[in-house]
Image (cartoon, grey):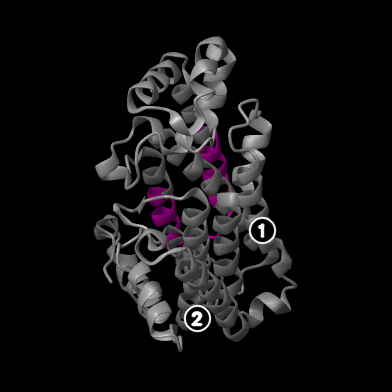
Amino acid sequence: MRIHHMWDAYPELQTDISRVLQFIESHIRVRDDTIEAVIRELMLPGGKLLRPAYTLLCSKIGPRQTEENAVALAAAIETLHMATLVHDDVIDESVTRRGMTTLHERFGNKFAIYAGDYLFCLCFSILSRYASSLIQNGFDFLSMEKILDGELAQLHARFQSQVSVKHYLARISGKTARLFAIGCYFGALSSEASEKEARAAWNMGHYIGMAFQIKDDILDYEGEQARVGKPVLHDIRQGIYTLPFIYAMKEEEERLRPYLERREQLSDEHAEEVKELIIKAGGIEHAQSVADRYTSKALAQLALMPDGDYKQTLKKLTLQLLRRDT
């Protein structure tokens, strides 16, 4: 278990993020030794833990700072995120995640799915104990199902090349942005922030999640496998058509169409040709512009929150996510 090196620049967060990982590890108790080993294996690659980091930062918004609750809620958010990653990898038949072999590749689909299911259960077990403030504030836990809706929308959209910008944004709103929004909202409510402040935290998290996913999709075209942690052009090979592709299709549909008909049989050479077409058509530039706009919206919501050192950290982290190359 290790902390990602990006947190070296945020010493004020490093200790709390370590506590989140320790909290998760201490609560993993499975009767089946193999499943427990699989789950602990999932924690080794050292993910960025961005979602719990935002939960921790937003727990500074209100007047009541309860570190134990903030760490627990951040842990719940991360276990939910890990569960979705495990199931994603099974569905997408992904071979690597964060530069390491995926669980289902190492242990098989059954063990991977059981591990994902356990993490879902662990998330709600933590919430049942530490989320009394959320229940008192009437948080609709059923809204978390929007995360699944986004995953299902992506599954149904595979190899559907006529996807619109509107449908893409709706898809990532559930798939990625919802969990960022929930994390920020949980953090704000745990600190007894006002409903107005908590709503601003939710909106900020949503916009951050949108920008983060768009940037992630851009990196699928311009990143390097060693840094990104997954094969470059992985999405297009899986029939997942993201914002750079959608914009490029408006300009180069006739030239892109023959490549799409190859579906999973797209060769490395043809994938590189697709990449060049998308770059030349301005797909990446258009997508980056949308990510910039969502980041600006996130910072506008941050400006509505009470003053404090946490605001500068939130701003620094959010801008870093937009400039990242991994």
Identified at 52% across, 74% down, the residue is 73
Q: Pointer 1: what residue? A: 199
Write down the quadrant of residue 20 in the picture.
Answer: bottom left
| Crowdedness near tag 1: few (<14), some (14–19) or many (≥20) residues, C-alpha within 10 Å | some
Q: Nearer the viewer, residue 12 or 46?
A: 46
Q: Nearer the viewer, residue 49 or 270?
A: 270
Q: Position of residue 19 (x, y in %)?
A: 36, 77
Mark 2 and mark 1: span between their CA atoms? 20 Å
* Amino acid identity at mark 2: Thr
Q: Main secondary structure of the magenta part?
A: helix
Q: Nearer the viewer, residue 45 or 54?
A: 45
Q: Pointer 2: what residue? A: 66
Identified at 27% across, 44% down, the residue is 227
Q: Position of residue 148 (x, y in %)?
A: 64, 57
**Is residue 60 shown to the viewer in this render?**
no
Judging from the image, what secondary structure is the residue with disc 2 in? loop
Which quadrant would the C terminus be assigned to in this image? top left
Identified at 49% across, 38% down, the residue is 238
Give the extent of the magenta segment.
292-317
**Is residue 235 shown to the viewer in this render?**
yes
Identified at 49% across, 25% down, the residue is 262
Q: Can you say whether 280 is above or below 200 in the image?
A: above
Q: Position of residue 256 (x, y in %)?
A: 51, 16
Which quadrant would the N terminus be assigned to in this image? bottom left
* Amino acid identity at mark 1: Arg
